[in-house]
Amino acid sequence: MAAPVHDRPPPGHRDTGGPPTAMTPEEAGALAHPSRRAIAEALGAAEGGLTVAELADRVGRHPNAVRQHLEVLQRAGIVVAAPSPPTGRRGRPSARYALAAPHAVAAVGHRELVRLLLELVRRAGTNEDDVEAFGWEQGRGLVARDAPPDALPASFAGLGFAPEEVTPEGERRQGRMDLRLRACPFKEAVLAEGGHLICALHRGLVRGALERIDADAELEVFEPKDPVTAGCRVLVSGLDREPVGTIGTEDDE
């Protein structure tokens, strides 16, 4: 568990500002599944697109499973489909799938670069407090000032953490937000030596974002889990939240 958010900036703070580039929540949610990441990466490496059969062969999945994952990727705007060029054979040509959002896959493909940068930070002797301070600076650029509380999970989604809110309604009315992060986009780096620094960076990001959302908000719990199975817990209190029934009537999918 992490200590509550403090009123003053963490050690080593320098206010640099500037929002980082991120995937949209829809792209991040679609790519949180490892099979869909593999499909997207295979499409990114294939010039001219791939058919379902070709994808199934490359990622080692059944064609029916590949079709289901492609539907999710299409709804998120990551993948597009078009008929294959005519071959002279009878029947309708197979659809070929290609990337519509290469930047989303590029973000996934940067995992090895993150791991190498982590090793550089570790060798440079940067300590956990310095890393968290840097995360705090960057977190302030994740959301707009006085953004609604739901901007916090939205920012996590944009970074690829696939957040799920599990806050009971009674606690929600008390200004709390309980999140489970269902994916770790940097699991390879977290599993490497010095991987705790990734968690420190993430903790700082949460603190910085919270400061922009609500000055009274506190990070009560930041509980890392095994990055392979994910499920890290983020518990926030002190938010100004409206009851669920007053926000809208959209059903969750």
Image (cartoon, rainbow, N blue to C red):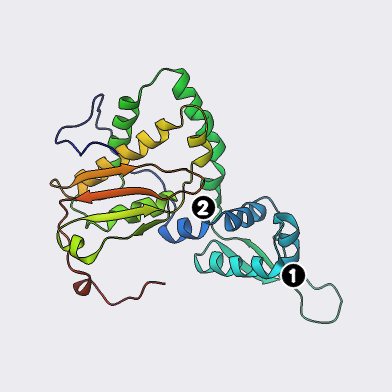
Closer to us: 8 or 181? 181
Left or right of 253? Residue 81 is right
> Which image quadrant for residue 62?
bottom right
Give the amino acid at mark 1.
Ser
Quarter of the figure with the C terminus: bottom left
Q: Secondary structure at mark 1?
A: loop
Quadrant housing residue 246: bottom left
Helix, strand, or loop for circle 2?
A: helix
The total of numbered circles placed on residues is 2
Residue at 41% across / 17% down in the picture? Answer: 125
Mark carried by residue 34: none
Q: Is residue 95 left or right of residue 78?
A: right
x then y, percent, for residue 1: 30, 39
Query: Residue at the location (32% across, 60% down)?
Result: 166
The correct choice, above or below, for 199 with respect to 90 in the image is above
Residue at 73% across, 55% down: 58
Query: Residue at 54% of width from left, 38% of height from top?
Result: 188
Give the vertical position of 74 relative to 189 (above or below): below
In this view, 154 is above or below 189: below
| 83, 236: nearer the viewer | 236
- Mark 1 touching mark 2, by CB under 8 A? no
The residue type indicated by label 2 comes to Ala
Residue annotated with mark 1: 84
Q: Is residue 140 visible?
A: no
Which mark, by number, is residue 104?
A: 2
